[in-house]
Image (cartoon, helix red, strand yellow):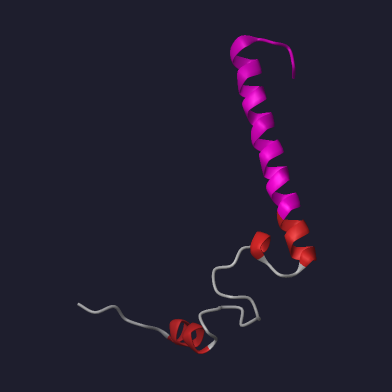
Amino acid sequence: MGARRGRKSEQREADGGNAAGDDRAPGTSWLDSTDPRRRRIGRGVLAAVWVYVAALWVLALDQTFGWGVF
């Protein structure tokens, strides 16, 4: 059986594979963007996620071993 193709996939192909239709290449992340503002925002979001995950780990370790950090 072949896969059915809808209008959205046809439109993406017409836009060059980019759903938004902007000038970025399909599949590029904010960190690979040519716009320095987007790169800065991407780095900030990535750093915030790292800090959040690290805080969750410290919280889990604190709850497990009773360190009294939180």
Q: Is residue 45 left or right of residue 29?
A: right
Q: Residue 10, position in %: x, y? A: 44, 87
- Position of the C terminus by quadrant: top right
Return the residue found at the far top.
66
Q: Residue 1, position in %: x, y? A: 19, 77
Q: What residue is rendered at 59% in x and 67% in y?
A: 28
Q: Is residue 56 magenta?
A: yes
Q: What residue is rendered at 31% in x and 81% in y?
A: 4
Segment colored magenta: 43-70
* Whether residue 39 is situated above or below residue 58 in the rendered picture: below
Q: In which quarter of the view is residue 3 placed? A: bottom left
Return the residue found at the far bottom.
14
Q: What residue is rendered at 50% in x and 87% in y?
A: 11
Q: What residue is rendered at 73% in x and 60% in y?
A: 39
* Whether residue 37 is situated above or below residue 60 in the rendered picture: below
Return the residue found at the far left.
1
Q: Is residue 62 left or right of residue 15?
A: right
Q: Residue 20, position in %: x, y? A: 61, 78
